[in-house]
Image: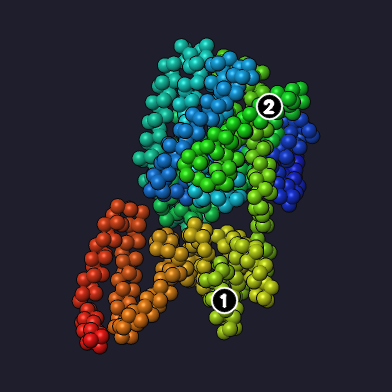
Amino acid sequence: MLSMAQWIQLILAAVIVVPLCARLGLGSVLGYLAAGVLVGPWVLGIVDEVEHVLHFAEYGVVLLLFVIGLELRPSRLWALRKAIFGAGTMQLLGSGVLLAGFLFLMGAPGKTAAVAGVVLALSSTAFALQILAERKELTARWGRTAFGVLLFQDLAVVPLLALLPLLGTAGEQTAAPSLSQLGISLGALLLVVFGGRHALRFALGLASRSHVREILTATALLAAFGTAYLLEAAGLSMALGAFLAGVLLADSEFRHQLEADIEPFKGLLLGLFFIAVGMSLNLGLLASGPARIALLVIGLVGLKFLALYALGRFSGLESADARKLGIALSQGGEFAFVLFGAVQAGGLISTSEVQELVVAVSLSMVTTPLLFLLHDALSGRQAPAPDFDQIDEQEAPVIIVGFGRFGQIAARVLGALRVPFTALDASHQQVDFVRKYGNDIYYGDGSRLDLLEAAGAQRARFLVLAIDDPDTSVRAAGLIRAHFPNLQVFARARDRNHAYRLMDTGVTLIRRETFHSALALTRDLLLALGMTGSAADRTLAIFREHDERRLQAHAALHDDQERMTRLARDAARELEELFKEDAGDLLRLARERDQTDR
C-alpha cells in the first residue's frame, strides 16, 4: 500500500503536470500519463507499487461506464445495436487479421500472432471515452459508432478470457472449467439485466426517503461497484457491470441526481487510472530495444487506424469523421494486460514477448491525444477553452443559461426593464462577442452544479433554460430540478423530441423555438389566401390547442416509436375532424371568394 507521503507526491505531480499540459493544448489525458511516468519507478521512483495503484484506479473506469450508462435508455441502446454488433464485429475481425499478419511478418509463430492480433485489436475504453467526452463528440454519429465498438469489445473480453487459454499447452486441463465459467457468466448477466432494475430502484428509493444526500450518493456508488463486482466474480468485466447498472437506472427519477453526485469521484479515479498507466510504462525495455518497440507501436496504431477508417467509410461516415474514429480507437486497451497474462499462463506467449507487447500497448495510448492534436492542427480545430469563468456570488432573481439567439431576446427585454439577471453560455467565442457590447455574461457549462451554485441558483427565483444542444439542455434541466426544486424553469425546446425529454425531468414551462413563429407565418399565409383575420385566428387556435394537448398526452410514450407513429395518425384524423366541425367560416369564405372571382 502507498504511504501518505507517496499519495501526496503523486497528487502534487498531477496538480502541476496536468494543468501545464492542458495549458499547452496537449489535453488532460496526456498530462496524467506524463505525471505517471514522472513519479513512476523509471524516473523519480516515488511510487513503485504500480500494480496496487492500477487495480485501485480501475474503479474510475467503472464509474465512467456507469455514468455513460445513465445517459443511455434501453431504447437508445437498442438503437445502437448495429454499431455494437455490426461495426464492433467488423472492427475486431478486421483489426485482428491485419495485426496478426503484421506480427507474423515480424517473426512471431502463427498461433502466437493470431492470438496477439486479436488482443491488440481491443481498444482502451477509458482513453477513448475520456477523449470523446473532452471533445464533446460522444453524441456525434462517429462518437456513437466508437462507443458501440467499445461496448462490443467489452462483451468480447468474456469469451476471449475463456477461449484464448485453451489454445495453449494447458488447454486440455482448463477446458471444462472454462465452459462452466461461460455458463456462470451468462447466468450472472441475465440476473442483472432482468432482476437488477427493480432491486436498484428499490435501494435508491429507500436512500432518497432518508433525505440525506450523502446516503443517496453512497447508494449510487454501491449500485455501480456492487454490480461491477458481481459480474467480475462471474468472469465478466467490471466495466460491463457498471454500464449495465447505469442503463437500468437511465429512465429512473434518480438519473440526473446520480450523475451529478458521481461525477467528482469518476473524474478523480479516472485521472488516477491514467497516472497508473504512465507509471507502468517500462522505460528500461524501451531503452534496450527502441527500434523494435517503435515498429510495434507504429504497426499497432497504423493498422488499427486503417481498419477503423475503412469501417467508418463503409458505415457512411464522412472522411473527417472516419479519421477521428480511427484515431480514437487506434490504441491498445487495458484488457490487453489481463488477456496477455492469461495466454502467457497457458504457455502460448513467452514472458519477453508479453513484456514487449505491453510496452507497445502503453505507448500506443500516448499516441492517441498526440494524433488528435495533429489532426486538429491540420483541420483547423481550435483547442478547448477553460472550464468556466470565476463568478462572484450573484443575487439576481433571474438566471439565463444559454445566451444565443433565443436567450438574448429575454435578456434584452429584462435589461430594458432594469431587471437584473446573470447570463451563462458555454461558447467562449459567444461570450467574448457579447461582452464587447457591454453585456454582463459569464463563460461556463450551465449543466454543472458548481457553476449554477456560483451563479446564485439557490437564491434566484427564475431560470431561463435556452441551451441550443438538446443533450446538454436536458442534463442541465435534470440537475436544476434535482438541486434547486424551488427555481421556476422556463425552457426553450429545439423540437418536439427535445420538449418530451425536458418534460421527463419535470420541467413544465416549455416553448418550442419554431412553433409560435411558424404559427405567425401560417397566419400571414392564410390571410394572403383570402381568409378573414377571425377565421385565421380560430383555425390556428384549434391547431395550437390540439397540438399542445397531444404533446402532454404523448409525453410518457415518446420512447415507443411504433406506438407514437400510430398515435400520430390518430391525431391527424382527430385534427381533421376538429377542422370539419369548425368549417362554417371557411366554407362561407370560399363561396364569397368564388362569387368575387366571377
Q: Residue at x 38, y 26 (%)?
A: 183
Question: According to the image, label 2 marks what residue?
Answer: 295
Dot placed on the residue nearer the N-terminal end, 1 or 2: 2
> For this rendering, which residue is in front, 155 or 582?
582
Q: Position of residue 52 (x, y in %)?
A: 64, 32
Q: How many marks?
A: 2
Up-down relation of residue 294 to residue 71 (above or below): above
Q: Position of residue 182 (x, y in %)?
A: 41, 25
Residue 366 position by quadrant: top right
| 222 left or right of 382 in image | left
What amino acid type is highlighted by mark number 1? Ala
Which of the numbered marks, if any, corresponds to residue 543? none
Residue 435 position by quadrant: bottom right
Render colour scheme: rainbow
Question: Does residue 417 show up?
Answer: yes
Question: Does residue 147 show up?
Answer: no
What amino acid type is highlighted by mark number 2? Leu
- CA separation in Å, label 1 and label 2: 58 Å
> For this rendering, which residue is in front, 403 or 202?
403
Q: Residue at x 58, y 42 (%)?
A: 323
Q: Position of residue 275 (x, y in %)?
A: 68, 39
- How many residues crowd around disc 1 within 10 Å: few (fewer than 14), some, or many (20 or more)? many
Looking at the rendered image, the quarter that the C terminus falls into is bottom left
Up-down relation of residue 248 to residue 583 (above or below): above
Q: Secondary structure at mark 1?
A: helix
Q: Residue at x 38, y 80 (%)?
A: 524
Up-down relation of residue 149 to residue 447 (above or below): above
Question: According to the image, label 1 marks what residue?
Answer: 411
Looking at the rendered image, the quarter that the N terminus falls into is top right
Q: Secondary structure at mark 2?
A: helix
- How many residues crowd around disc 2 within 10 Å: few (fewer than 14), some, or many (20 or more)? few
Q: Position of residue 236 (x, y in %)?
A: 47, 31
